[in-house]
Image: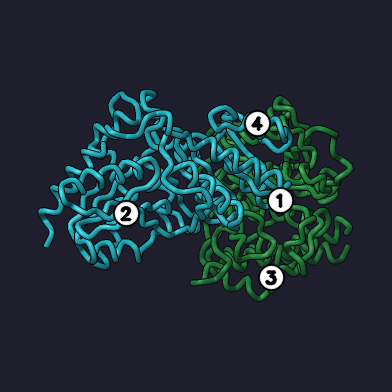
Chain colours: A cyan, B green
């Protein structure tokens, strides 16, 4: 693994909560709702500043999401924060009926998504949430890649009227974007130009995909790299051009390969410009014991692993 | 509005509901008849709502958590002027906004989309909390079925409402003693309900859910106890108003045939004639 030294890695939760505090200082209607997760959602400072605007419903995720929908109906702007695994798994029907179908202005913030809880095991992994939530109409699904995109996406979510699922991690990632970056929902970011194939990633995988592209360049393979934070609505145009212009696509995600980013990309590829693809992610198993970074490496998503899959895939190009 | 006037309206609502179920060939007639008086009292006596401005921010909120009785709500909304009366005939027709369960984005007067049970009360808790945070005077009412109280999500919300001291929240349980497939007593018997709510820190009162005076008195804002959410256990009958449907499990969602429809309407019309005579 050649991810940067730990000194330059950042926990995106900090960017999320400090942005939320900045927004809350300007907008009295912003409230944070949590399920006994003040610490893990990093809402301690928010609670100290606005104790009455931190609504802790206790360990009760169905009520958590329902209360969020009700707060929105009553004119509040709720950021509903909980570990992504419990938020999406335990309260999926509330997300469907009370938030998506009712089309309420609720921001669902899935903290410690993917395999961030590593050694705690598959009960605490949230590696199905893209699939579950992107199947629901009305909800914008976003997985930011670094602290700058996290802040920008949080700011955007507050400005947007409608349901949003912000999928956040606690696993440290390096900065990819520069200060002042503006988040555009449904628009992929071209991080590296290339013509031999395209690597598409989001969340904790974007920086790994960028490192993989450097490894590939040493071998004379020029990979395009797209950061695709928004999984729904997916950026069809960027995917279609990547397919037609580079002829092969590798997707990387901290999620099962069934129904997530890779599937969303593949849906567009088969409908627009079919090309060889490789979907990297959790390969349809409950993960063994290990940290998130260990498991990502194990599942072929170290920068070297991604590069190897890419080099193998382009042999199948037409 | 007087209890007699409310009863006359409720009778009209039951007749329109029965006709709509008969014509659509579907509906949840039993629960619609049991909740009809509660919804009538709410919309014609209790709620501060305005059909001409259904989204006004300071309106009272009414959540029908037992969303499968949407038709009763639609008929009440049409009688109250939120939607045209003639629209009831589109119930369940292709592309009608009058779906089998209510849609807030299409039907004015609907606050949240319900259908799966155990959703309304948590949402109502959020509404009441929002009013509290804004120091707003509006009140939130939520109507659940009694079978629905078997959903664990309701008890999550009951805990939170007491913890938040939401005395601007009223839960009305339509206690008709029958759920879809059997009697409550033969399934998970939650009765008596009031002591359970009280144990969770609510005030709770048992009333006759078909007595308009009792309903209006129990739901009046002045009946609130400071610092406590309020539960009104409305003792009702499934199929109330039609003798052969009353208190029968089979009439949860059975559709009357022509003869049953005729007989049911005749009974309701007789009741109407007596009431209008009073």
Which one is in front in this view, the residue at disc 4 or the one at disc 1?
A: 4
Say whether disc 1 or disc 2 marks the residue closer to the N-terminus: 1
- Asked whether B268 or A97 is in front, the reply is A97
Which x, y percent locates residue B244? 61, 54
Q: Quadrant of residue A247?
A: bottom left
Q: Residue at x 56, y 58 (%)?
A: B101
* Badge 1 and badge 3 both on one subunit: no
Say whether disc 2 or disc 4 marks the residue closer to the N-terminus: 4
| Marks 3 & 4, CB-CB < 8 Å contact | no
Image mark 1: chain: A
Label 3 element class? loop
Q: Quadrant of residue A128?
A: top left
Which x, y percent locates residue B22? 56, 67
- Measured in 3D between alpha carbons, the distance from the residue under mark 4 to the one under mark 1, in whole angstroms, is 25 Å
- Asked whether B243 or B229 is in front, the reply is B229
Instruction: Kindly identify which residue carries mark 1.
Output: A74
Instruction: Kindly identify which residue carries mark 3.
Output: B83
The quadrant of the rendering that contains the C terminus of chain A is: bottom left
- Measured in 3D between alpha carbons, the distance from the residue under mark 1 to the one under mark 3, in whole angstroms, is 23 Å
On screen, residue A293 above or below A221: above
Which one is in front in this view, the residue at disc 3 or the one at disc 4?
A: 4
Say whether disc 4 or disc 1 marks the residue closer to the N-terminus: 4
Which one is in front in this view, the residue at disc 2 or the one at disc 3?
A: 2
| Marks 2 & 4, CB-CB < 8 Å contact | no
Instruction: Kindly identify which residue carries mark 2.
Output: A192
Label 2 element class? strand
């Amino acid at each position: 693994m050649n991810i940067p030294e730990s000194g330059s890695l950042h926990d995106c939760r900090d960017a999320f909560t400090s942005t939320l505090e900045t927004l809350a200082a300007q907008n009295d209607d912003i409230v944070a709702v949590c399920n006994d997760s003040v610490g893990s959602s990093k809402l301690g400072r928010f609670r100290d500043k606005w104790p009455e605007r931190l609504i802790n419903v206790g360990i009760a995720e169905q009520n958590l999401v329902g209360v969020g929908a009700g707060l929105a109906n009553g004119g509040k702007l709720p950021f509903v924060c909980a570990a992504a695994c419990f938020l999406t798994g335990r309260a999926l029907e509330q997300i469907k009926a009370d938030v998506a179908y009712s089309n309420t202005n609720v921001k669902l913030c899935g903290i410690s998504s993917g395999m961030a809880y590593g050694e705690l095991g598959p009960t605490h992994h949230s590696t199905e949430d893209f699939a579950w939530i992107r199947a629901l109409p009305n909800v914008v699904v976003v997985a930011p890649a670094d602290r700058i995109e996290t802040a920008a996406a949080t700011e955007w979510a507050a400005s947007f009227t409608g349901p949003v699922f912000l999928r956040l991690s606690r696993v440290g990632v390096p900065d990819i974007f520069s200060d002042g970056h503006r988040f555009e929902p449904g628009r992929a970011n071209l991080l590296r130009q290339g013509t031999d194939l395209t690597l598409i990633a989001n969340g904790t995988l974007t920086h790994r995909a960028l490192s993989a592209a450097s490894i590939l360049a040493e071998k004379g393979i020029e990979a395009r790299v797209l950061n695709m934070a928004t999984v729904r609505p997916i950026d069809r145009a960027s995917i279609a051009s990547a397919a037609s212009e580079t002829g092969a696509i590798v997707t990387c995600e901290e999620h099962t390969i069934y129904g997530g980013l890779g599937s969303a990309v593949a849906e567009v590829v088969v409908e627009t410009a079919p090309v060889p693809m490789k979907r990297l992610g959790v390969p349809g198993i409950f993960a063994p014991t290990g940290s998130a970074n260990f498991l990502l490496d194990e599942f072929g998503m170290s920068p070297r692993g991604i590069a190897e899959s890419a080099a193998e895939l382009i042999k199948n190009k037409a | 509005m007087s209890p007699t006037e409310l009863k006359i309206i409720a009778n009209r609502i039951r007749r329109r509901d029965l006709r709509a179920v008969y014509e659509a060939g579907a509906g949840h007639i039993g629960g619609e008849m049991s909740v009809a008086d509660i919804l009538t009292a709410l919309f014609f006596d209790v709620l501060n709502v305005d059909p001409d401005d259904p989204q006004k921010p300071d309106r009272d909120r009414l959540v029908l958590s037992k969303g499968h009785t949407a038709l009763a709500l639609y008929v009440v909304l049409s009688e109250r002027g939120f939607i045209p009366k003639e629209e009831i005939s589109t119930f369940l027709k292709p592309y009608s906004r009058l779906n089998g369960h209510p849609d807030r984005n299409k039907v004015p007067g609907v606050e949240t989309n319900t259908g799966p049970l155990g959703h309304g009360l948590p949402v109502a808790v959020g509404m009441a909390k929002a009013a509290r945070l804004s120091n707003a005077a509006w009140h939130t009412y939520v109507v659940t079925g009694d079978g629905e109280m078997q959903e664990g999500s309701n008890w999550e919300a009951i805990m939170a409402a007491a913890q938040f001291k939401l005395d601007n929240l009223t839960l009305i349980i339509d206690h008709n003693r029958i759920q879809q497939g059997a009697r409550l007593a033969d399934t998970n018997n939650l009765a008596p309900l009031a002591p359970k709510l009280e144990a969770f820190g609510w005030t709770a009162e048992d009333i006759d859910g078909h007595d308009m005076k009792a309903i209006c008195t129990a739901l009046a804002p002045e009946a609130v106890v400071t610092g406590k959410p309020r539960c009104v256990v409305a003792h009702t009958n499934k199929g109330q108003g039609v003798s052969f449907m009353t208190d029968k499990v089979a009439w949860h969602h059975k559709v009357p045939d022509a003869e049953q429809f005729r007989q049911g309407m005749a009974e309701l019309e007789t009741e109407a004639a007596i009431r209008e005579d009073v």
